[in-house]
């Protein structure tokens, strides 16, 4: 029987006016936020996609379909808690998480520790289990032009 599984996730949303910027379940001061049906938290979305992938249960859209009115304005941490339930129901636990936010702006370094705490709390795991990093594309491409923010995540699940 397999004792570990690995999953990867990725998400990207456009930056738009008149929306709060939410990453890892916390509001980041910025003049623009991310477009989406829910709170558009790309970090939490990438993490959920990685967890679902490790479970071989499909992708995020299978569970929380875009355009579904039930998820309009939803807090992504609440959705993450639902995915946490699926992890446990299927007999797994989070071994560790390594996630990266890709954004030209805003500077995210000062917010990383609070994001880690937020995600660890929602998953009910030890803070040392959750790594969150931030990087930029050095002004290259869509993200470098400040058109959006992306995130990727890798998770290890253990029996």
Image (spheres, rainbow, N blue to C red):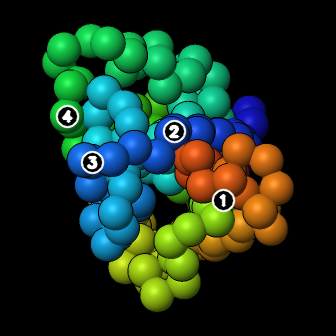
**Direction from residue 39 to residue 127 in the image, left or right:** right
Give x and y (percent) for residue 130. Answer: 54, 70
Give x and y (percent) for residue 40. Answer: 38, 41
Q: Residues within 10 Å of mark 3 (few under 14, many from 20)?
A: some
Residue under pointer 2: 13
Query: Marks 4 and 2, how far apart in space?
Result: 15 Å
Q: Earlier in the sequence, mark 1 or mark 4?
A: 4
Q: Earlier in the sequence, mark 2 or mark 1?
A: 2
Q: Nearer the viewer, mark 3 or mark 2?
A: 3
Q: Residues within 10 Å of mark 1 (few under 14, many from 20)?
A: many
**Residue 73, numbered label:** 4
Q: Earlier in the sequence, mark 1 or mark 3?
A: 3
Q: Earlier in the sequence, mark 4 or mark 3?
A: 3
**Direction from residue 84 to residue 13 in the image, left or right:** right
Residue 74 location, quadrant? top left
Residue in view at x 47 percent, y 31 percent? 90
Q: Tag 3's secondary structure?
A: loop
Residue 8 location, quadrant? top right
Q: Earlier in the sequence, mark 4 or mark 2?
A: 2
Q: Tag 2's secondary structure?
A: strand
Residue under pointer 1: 102
**Residue 19, numbered label:** 3
Query: Marks 1 and 3, how far apart in space?
Result: 19 Å
Query: Which is more toward the observer, 150 or 131?
Result: 150
Query: Marks 2 and 1, how far apart in space?
Result: 11 Å
Query: Marks 3 and 2, how far apart in space?
Result: 12 Å
Q: Tag 1's secondary structure?
A: strand
Q: Residues within 10 Å of mark 2 (few under 14, many from 20)?
A: some
Give x and y (percent) for residue 158. Answer: 62, 51
């Amino acid at each position: 029987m397999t004792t570990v599984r690995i999953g990867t996730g990725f998400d990207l949303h456009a930056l738009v006016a008149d929306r709060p910027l939410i990453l890892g379940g916390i509001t980041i001061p910025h003049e623009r936020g991310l477009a989406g049906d829910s709170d558009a938290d790309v970090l939490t979305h990438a993490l959920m996609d990685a967890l679902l992938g490790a479970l071989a249960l499909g992708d995020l859209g299978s569970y929380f379909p875009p355009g579904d009115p039930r998820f309009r304005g939803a807090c992504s941490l609440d959705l993450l808690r639902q995915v946490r339930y699926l992890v446990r129901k299927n007999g797994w636990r989070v071994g560790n998480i390594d996630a990266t936010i890709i954004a030209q702006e805003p500077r995210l370094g000062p917010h990383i520790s609070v994001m880690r705490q937020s995600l660890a709390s929602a998953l009910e795991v030890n803070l040392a289990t959750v790594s969150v990093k931030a990087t930029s594309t050095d002004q290259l491409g869509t993200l470098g032009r400040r058109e959006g923010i992306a995130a990727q995540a890798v998770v290890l699940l253990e029996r």
